Image (cartoon, rainbow, N blue to C red):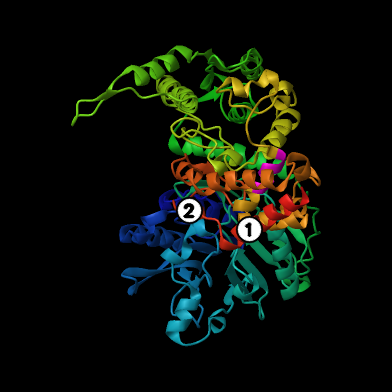
Amino acid sequence: MEVVPGRPDLNCRTMLDMIGEARRGGAHIIVFPEMSVPGYLLGNTWGQRAFLRDCEEYGRQVIKASSGICVLFGNVGVDWNRTTGGRVCKYNAVFAAQNGRLIKNKYYPYPFQIKEYATGCPDFDEARHFCSLSDLARDMGPKAGELKQPVRINIGGEPLLLACSFYNEGNGDERAAMPLKGAHLLINIAASPFAVGKNNLRKRFLSGLAAGAGAPLIFVNNVGIQNSGKTVYTYDGGSAIFDGFGEIIDCCAPFTPELKFVDLDFGCRGRNAIPIPVAQGSDIGSTYSALNYGIRKFLAMIGMKRVVIGVSGGIDSAVSAALYGTVLDPGDLLLVSMPSMYTSRTTRDLAGKLARNLGCLYSVMPIQDAVEFTVGQISKTPVINMKTGKRQQLAVAPFVAENIQARDRSARILAGVAAAFGGGFTCNSNKSEMTIGYATMCGDLAGFLAALADLWKYQVYGLAGYLNEHVYRREVIPRESIDIVPSAELSFEQAVDEGKGDPVIYPYHDYLFRAFMEREDRVAPEDILTWWVEGVLEERIGCRPGLVKRIFKDTGEFIFDLERWWTQYTGIGVAKRIQSPPVLAVSRRPYGFGQREAQNRVHFTASYLRLKKEALKHKTTEQ
């Protein structure tokens, strides 16, 4: 089902409709996902007692509707008599109801079962809001395992043992969270967001769980979007049923609400159904599906019907425009080209060509006069020392003038046009730029949503090809926008017609930056320099073999580049990321609340400094 975060009223209505349909279809059991009543990513709403009482109220409505059918659903379980840290004790819980009443596990003090471990993903902050089964076991005396027992229901007079648990991603041995002994059917409910490659991990784990228990397993996940304020997650569902041999015998389509009926024969471990082949979709295809779904749902959630996109003729804005073009009617999408004296005729033409290909609204609003006015106003207006009366003028350096251009485009034109158009404007920055702060605050980083900010540059290029070939089935994104050198075009030093562009060498730096922030064991300059010295850098970070040696002529040049980007990543890049728009997540490591970044001074470890000294000494000796 689609779970709407923070709206137990809407979720309850959906559940009651589905229960009614399931009963009419002759179902004995219906299973809903984790936290199906309240939603999951609710922030400090979890601290509102009124909201908790509301969730209980709607939970009672679901329980009342279980006449003639067994209903399993996720909700918050509250112990109003216990507190922890001054807050009422609450649990991430699964409820089993039949014939209008809850089915209680005799080992539990509550009429619901509790998630054993807090989810390991930091964005969810589960340990902050909920007590766990381990906490309960510690307070009660028995081990957590003694509390994990199947619940008994009756289907047509026959007893059936259901083992209920939660999909607990990112937290060690999830198998320990499933009570397997003697169960006829395993129920595993989830609130697990989409990430590239995650579905295959889910399937391998759940398949092993079902085969190990020798019992069918029902995995139920939700669809929809939820957010932590700084990160927007899509939920792809992926609900599936595994027989007792670990084979998938049925599944739901991704990103689609669906009530599916399945007949299971427990006498043959569910092998009454024939295992189905599960298509292995491409990473770029699933990434597109998540982005399309996330944009569409986010626009609906915030009530935005029209979008303005600043287009440069380059790849990022072209992909952004093509993505929004799959969601909006052409009359609700406005592309704006904002050329300056540095904008080439090539990119001006490409921006117009993109708009024609999409058939959307288009406008050209030059910025040169406004930029010159701003530069002149700053440089010619005196700054007065009110103590001494001394007057001085501020000098506008070339770099400052470049930033003025970026801010003029976003904070002045796009913001104003969006207000007049009755919509919002986008942030087109990608993950590579977000990592090193290669974007202007209140400029490139402005907008209501950063839809590309969890994609490395090479993924942006891959998405461009996918949009043309598989989505539009024609060349909507001009081939020249894909082939042209990436450039901000903010000075003559970035003239694309002369092959000049960004200072980032994406085929290498994408993988360097990814090593900094996406790996479980975060990589620092000490690791990178060690791998460079040992000659295994490309292998360790995953870029093309031999590439690094072709880019840097010696160790000194390599170290200069490494320190430059590490300083950007851990310095000004942090400040810019904190102030960036919400990021639409497609990876397991998106920027946002889950990164827990702090604005501290840039640091190089003592071991790195020693290694650097030795490496440079070796270079000097060789020369």
Cβ atoms at labels 1 and 2 below 8 Å apart: no
Instruction: State whether residue 207 is above or below residue 474.
Output: below
Mark 1 vs mark 2: which is more N-terminal?
1
Q: 26 or 92, which is in the foreground?
A: 92
Residue for badge 2: 597
Q: Residue furthest bottom?
A: 141
Residue 501 pos. (x, y %): 64, 27
Residue 298 pos. (x, y %): 50, 39
Question: Can I make out residue 532 in this image?
Answer: yes
Asked whether residue 457 is drawn in magenta, I would say: no
Q: Residue at x 71, y 52 (%)?
A: 541
Instruction: State whether residue 387 is above or below residue 47.
Output: above
Range of residues picked out in magenta: 507-512
Residue 399 pos. (x, y %): 49, 28
Numbered badge on residue 199: none
Question: Can I make out residue 255 in this image?
Answer: no
Residue for badge 1: 526
Label 1 sits on what residue type? Answer: Glu
Residue 228 pos. (x, y %): 46, 50
Instruction: State whether residue 84 is above or below residue 407.
Output: below
Q: Residue at x 37, y 55 (%)?
A: 45
Q: 333 or 274, which is in the foreground?
A: 333
Asked whether residue 510 is drawn in magenta, I would say: yes
Q: CA distance from mark 1 to mark 2?
A: 20 Å
- SS of the residue at dot 2? loop
- SS of the residue at dot 1? helix
Q: Residue at x 73, y 65 (%)?
A: 207
Q: Quadrant of residue 500?
A: top right
The reply, left or right, for residue 414 in relation to residue 281 is left
